[in-house]
């Protein structure tokens, strides 16, 4: 893609998200979401491959449906209550419709079916943008709408997403689909605690973005798209292979890695709120996700790819991929757990 065109598209992507962040009026927020969607469509379709075009079409139709639902919810609220402000969303029909529309935009269960299919058809870099940056604007709206939503709806959405994210990833061999189900499960944790401690939702989102960025960039450096090709990681980049395995375990939430921090704090807060059943179900459903991360680690660390070629080993060649962003996010994905007391003190101020 032409660098000037790409710059304009990425600037529009940023503009749409910032516009939604800064808006207090539903129409302005809706415009930000639309700019965001229209800016990423050409980036998704730049491969000119039938699979990429199919993924782009599915994404466009899904996002257009969600945007129409948001417009319908805000118009209904303005008609029934007389308010266009995001904070003034109060009618039950409008709040439920808006929440389902934002769930569709994010890919929460039970409206998650588009996310694995779309992510599977995209390049890893575009998939990274879709899994991280594209979650920010809908989440900003969801945090503002959450106080008006029935808590049982949010708990149900969160638990269902954690279960579907864990269950759906078990039988996958494609890494992009596994990361899509991982995204659904992490979003479930964020929504589960949204009404009780919004600052924990923001902390989870921040760490999710760091860990997912590290996973996508590591897979791109290894040029791995399936579980089988993970076995070649050791020959391609010996230093990156164990780090990638640790990042995957961090995504699963194993201590002493950074991914344990949000799960620990969320379970603690749920217990404080006297919700032992959702906390227990969430903790048990997290074991499903941990299983397929362990599967990936096993494929990467304990299997050897059948290699009968007499060519020069790839890791002896020049490594031309820019590794600074990968290094930064990998360190953060692995080593932030000791900062938990400081983070909790800052967030509760």
Image (cartoon, rainbow, N blue to C red):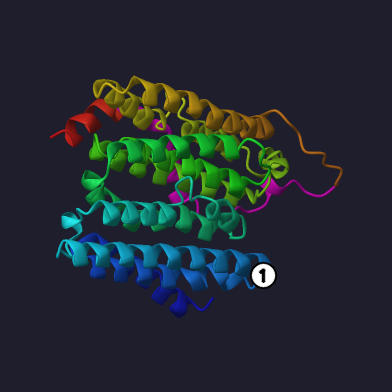
Side of 213 relative to 279 (left or right)? right
Residue 220 in percent (x, y) is at: 58, 52
| Residue 322 vs residue 195, the one in the foreground | 195
The residue under label 1 is: 49
Q: Give the range drawn in magenta.
A: 310-338
Q: Residue 304's spot in the image, x, y percent? A: 76, 34
Based on the picture, tell me whether residue 145 belongs to the magenta stretch: no
Q: Nearer the viewer, residue 92 or 326?
A: 92
Q: Quadrant of residue 149?
A: top left
Q: Closer to the camera, 201 or 254?
A: 201
Horizontal arrangement in the rendering, residue 314 relative to residue 8 (left or right): right
Whether residue 331 is visible here, answered yes or no, is no
For residue 202, side relative to residue 177 (left or right): left
Circle 1 — which element? loop
Magenta highlight on residue 316: yes
The total of numbered circles placed on residues is 1
Tell me where residue 258 sits by quadrant. top left
- Where residue 127 sits: x, y (%)? 52, 56
The residue shown at (18%, 35%) is: 346
At 57% from the left edge and 72% from the top edge, which residue is drawn? 46
Image quarter (top left, top right, bottom left or bottom right) of the C terminus: top left
Q: In this view, does 163 lie above or below 213?
A: above
Residue 129, position in %: x, y?
46, 58
The quadrant in which residue 321 appears is bottom right
Residue 197 showing in the rendered view: yes
């Amino acid at each position: 893609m032409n660098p000037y065109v790409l710059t304009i598209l990425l600037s529009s992507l940023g503009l749409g998200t910032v516009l939604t962040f800064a808006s207090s009026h539903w129409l302005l927020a809706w415009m930000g979401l639309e700019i965001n969607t229209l800016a990423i469509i050409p980036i998704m379709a730049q491969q000119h491959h039938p699979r990429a075009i199919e993924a782009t079409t599915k994404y466009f139709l899904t996002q257009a449906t969600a945007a129409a639902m948001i417009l319908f919810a805000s118009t209904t609220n303005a008609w029934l209550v007389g308010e266009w402000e995001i904070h003034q969303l109060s009618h039950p029909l409008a709040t439920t419709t808006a929440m389902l529309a934002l769930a569709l935009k994010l890919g929460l269960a039970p409206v998650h079916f588009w996310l694995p299919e779309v992510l599977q058809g995209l390049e890893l870099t575009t998939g990274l943008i879709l899994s991280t940056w594209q979650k920010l604007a809908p989440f900003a709206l969801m945090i503002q709408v959450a106080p008006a939503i029935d808590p049982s709806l949010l708990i149900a959405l969160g638990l269902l997403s954690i279960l579907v994210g864990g269950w759906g990833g078990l039988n996958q061999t494609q890494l992009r689909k596994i990361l899509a189900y991982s995204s659904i499960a992490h979003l479930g944790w964020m929504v589960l605690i949204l009404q009780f401690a919004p600052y924990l939702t923001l902390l989870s989102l921040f760490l999710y973005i760091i860990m997912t960025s590290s996973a996508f960039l590591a897979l791109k450096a290894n040029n791995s798209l399936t579980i089988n090709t993970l076995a070649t990681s050791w020959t391609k980049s010996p230093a990156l292979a164990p780090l990638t395995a640790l990042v995957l375990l961090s995504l699963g939430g194993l201590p002493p890695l950074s991914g344990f921090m949000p799960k620990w704090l969320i379970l603690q807060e749920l217990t404080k709120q006297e919700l032992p059943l959702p906390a227990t179900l969430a903790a048990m459903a997290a074991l499903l996700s941990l299983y397929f991360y362990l599967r990936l680690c096993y494929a990467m660390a304990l299997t050897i790819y059948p290699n009968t070629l007499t060519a020069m080993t790839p890791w002896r060649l020049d490594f031309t991929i820019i590794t600074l962003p990968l290094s930064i996010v990998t360190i953060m994905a692995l080593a932030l757990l000791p900062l938990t007391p400081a983070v909790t003190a800052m967030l509760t101020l």
